[in-house]
Image (cartoon, rainbow, N blue to C red):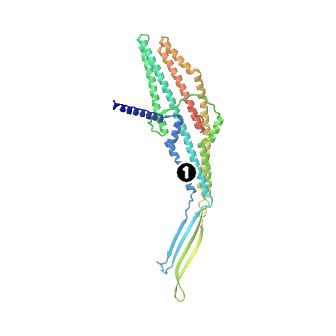
Amino acid sequence: MKTIRPYLWAMALFFSLSSVLLAQEKDLNRFTLEEAIQQALEHNRDLSALRKNRLIADGALVRARTYLFNPDIDLGVATDRWIKNEKENSYRLGVSQEIEIAGQRGLRIQSVTLEKDRIELDVQNAERLLVAEVQGIFNQILHLERRIAFSEEVINLSRQLVKTTEDRFNVGEVPGMDVGIAQVELNRTINEKTVLEREMAVLRARLNRLMGRPPQANLKLSGDITFHPVSFNLEELLQLAQEGRPDLSALQLRLKQADIETNLQRRERITNLRFSTFVEKSRGTLADASGATLSDQDTLIGVGLTFSLPILNQRRGEIMEARGVALRTDQEREALALHVEEEVNQAFFRLSLTQNVLTLFEKGILGQSRENLDLIRVAYEVGEVGITTVIQEQERFIRTNVSYFDALFDFHAALIDLERSVGKQIMKGMM
């Protein structure tokens, strides 16, 4: 007994720790909508790759701020050793520097600074789309979970109908065909649930990928899709979208960039100046009238200025190209502004429509449908109606509830589309 008791304590401790670890693992695999969004924003691979463009933009800004032209060193030596060999030599040391005089460097810095801001807006826009995608799949999974739970309820109803039919067949109240019809209905509802479960597995894998997790990882969601009437002002939403959409703002910055690039190409027609300075030293020998040889040394210091004449190349093609980019960007911005307005309008009216539909459902359609089914089933049990009537009423009950679930899904999908279109959070706490 003394040796067994420590063993039992060790086993109890092991199972206790295992339970704690399993509970922690379960918690790590369960996400609310806010947690799923945060996980995606932090670990999504595509978004992480896009964020690396910030490093590229930082490097481009350092390059733009760095002066383009390094000084040139001019070294030279000359001798007559292989000609007359009069021991005449010369040495030259020069330094030259090219200088931009039309402000091109400042324009390049402005352009790259705008590019850096535009990349930041591109990241924000990718985040906006990622959040909407996570919200959409989260909504789909919750919708399917509710559909699957309802399918289980329908399967139980079908099993009860099979049992009732078998009992009545055993006492000779109904033909054997009724048992077959009830069994077919049961199999159909089981198959429908299987289809929903397959669709659920695909969506869970997709959401895992968006969250930066392995597709096959265990995933559980905490949330519920319920109906709470909402009220928005369309004009305010349109204003928010025009002012806050990062993709619109990015195109506006791109238009400013194109104008700067056009100006830069015009400035590039003005040639750079090259200033130079040099020291030249020569040494040789001279003969005087008496025939004596004298040494001769000279040192010269000079400066120079070089520039090209902008005659043959006036950068007309580059200016036309930059101007064309500016005009195209302006058209893209106008087209996107119209598209944003259309997106907001469509999502707003879809939301209003589904909200009206859900209001009708919750005012009595659902309750009445269930009550009708219960009455028909009771009537079948006492022999007042046939099984075909029960099946038809059960199908109406299923269609009514599925239509309600679909309307509820559409309501939240419209909310998600509206938030995505506006570019601002408007549905916090809705799921």
Q: Residue at x 61, y 55 (%)?
A: 107
Q: Residue at x 52, y 36 (%)?
A: 35
The tally of labels here is: 1
Task: Name above or below for residue 67 compared with residue 19.
Answer: below
Task: Name above or below for residue 169 compared with residue 48.
Answer: above
Q: Amino acid at mark 1?
A: Ala
Q: Position of residue 209 (x, y in %)?
A: 47, 38
Quarter of the figure that contains the N terminus: top left
Circle 1 residue: 57
Q: Nearer the viewer, residue 425 or 87?
A: 425
The outermost residue toward the bottom is 290
Which of the 4 image quadrants contains residue 305? bottom right
The outermost residue toward the front is 2
179 horizontally vs 295: left or right: left
Query: How would you rate the neighbour count of disc 1 (Cα within 10 Å): few for under 14, some for 14-19, many for 20 or more?
Result: many
Quarter of the figure that contains the C terminus: top right
Q: Position of residue 365 (x, y in %)?
A: 57, 21
Q: Nearer the viewer, residue 124 or 223?
A: 223
Which of the 4 image quadrants contains residue 101? bottom right
Q: Nearer the viewer, residue 187 or 236?
A: 236
248 horizontally vs 284: left or right: right
Q: Position of residue 218 (x, y in %)?
A: 45, 34
219 horizontally vs 418: left or right: left
Which of the 4 image quadrants contains residue 421? top right
The outermost residue toward the top is 172
Q: Position of residue 106 (x, y in %)?
A: 61, 56
**Residue 200 seen in this snapshot:** yes
Which element type, helix, strand or loop, lies under badge 1? helix
**Residue 261 seen in this snapshot:** no
